[in-house]
Amino acid sequence: MPHRSGPHAPGSLWRDRDFRHYAVAQGISVTGSGVTTIALSVLAVVELHASTFNVALIAFASKLPPLLLSLHAGVLADRRRKRPLIITCDLLCAAVLLTLPTAQFLARITLIHLYAVAFTVAALQVIGSNASISFLPSLLGPERIKDGNAKMGAGNSLADLIGTNSGGALVVALGAARAITVDAASYLASALLLWRIKHREDPPPPRKAGTSQWAEIREGLTYTLNTPVVRSIVLSNTATSFVLAASSALWSLYLLVPA
């Protein structure tokens, strides 16, 4: 079974219909998530008059799932077909996010609701992200994966920049809760684009008899700790996430609350 639906010649990756759908889906989703990052903080501070502790809890709720679920999500992605898993996570994220504008319309929005949404969406993002990363090699094949990763890295960085910078404008124009509908719409668009991909991925390899999920996690940890390049990347990303989480928990208070 071929790994690509587009031309085989070098440099033709953007002419591959399936890769375009995949890349645009990822870019739209990342852009929408940048809007929600801004909107959640504004919603907490401006509309619910959240304290520093409350805002920190929202940030903590969104950072906890990667710590708790990343290893399990990796195993889950190995055991399932990736594309249906990504689509399911996108649809669930859209549904969860839409509960916020609905609650605001009904005058029922609370800080507990914000904590739950932040945690649930982050958990679904962990699962979807692991499946998405694992799906790309199947979509492109080994000879094009390096080019694909480079294009996806650049595209996602640009999408994150656009989402974060446009988030403030959307919050001002629509209000925080309504701006979150933009992110919900981005997940729906992502799911539609992924559904339109024609590539049929191979079924996951059969599990070894008697192999538990924890055994597979230990195997992955052993590989990570014993591979210098991978270990350095993991430690660097962990340190960066820690610093960014500490600062992002407070920026909204300094910007939105009068001195």
Image (cartoon, rainbow, N blue to C red):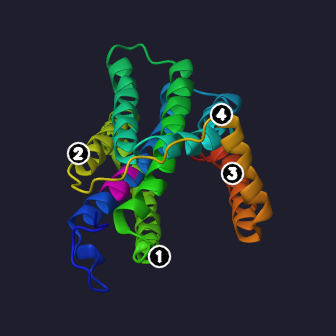
Identify the mark nearer the N-term, 1 or 2: 1
**Residue tagged 3:** 220
**Residue tagged 2:** 192
Identify the mark nearer the N-term, 3 or 2: 2
Magenta-tinted stretch: 25-29
Q: Nearer the viewer, mark 3 or mark 4?
A: 4
Mark 3 to mark 4 CA distance (whole Å): 17 Å
**Above or below, 126 relative to 169:** above
Query: Would you call the spot at circle 3 few (<14 residues within 10 Å), some (14-19), or many (20 or more)?
Result: some
Query: Residue 113: in sight, yes or no?
Result: yes
Which of 184/104 is in front? 184
**Residue 26 lies in the magenta-colored region:** yes
Determine whether, in the image, residue 41 is placed left or right of residue 106: right
Q: Nearer the viewer, mark 1 or mark 4?
A: 4
**Above or below, 16 relative to 29:** below
Q: Residue at x 64, y 35 (%)?
A: 213
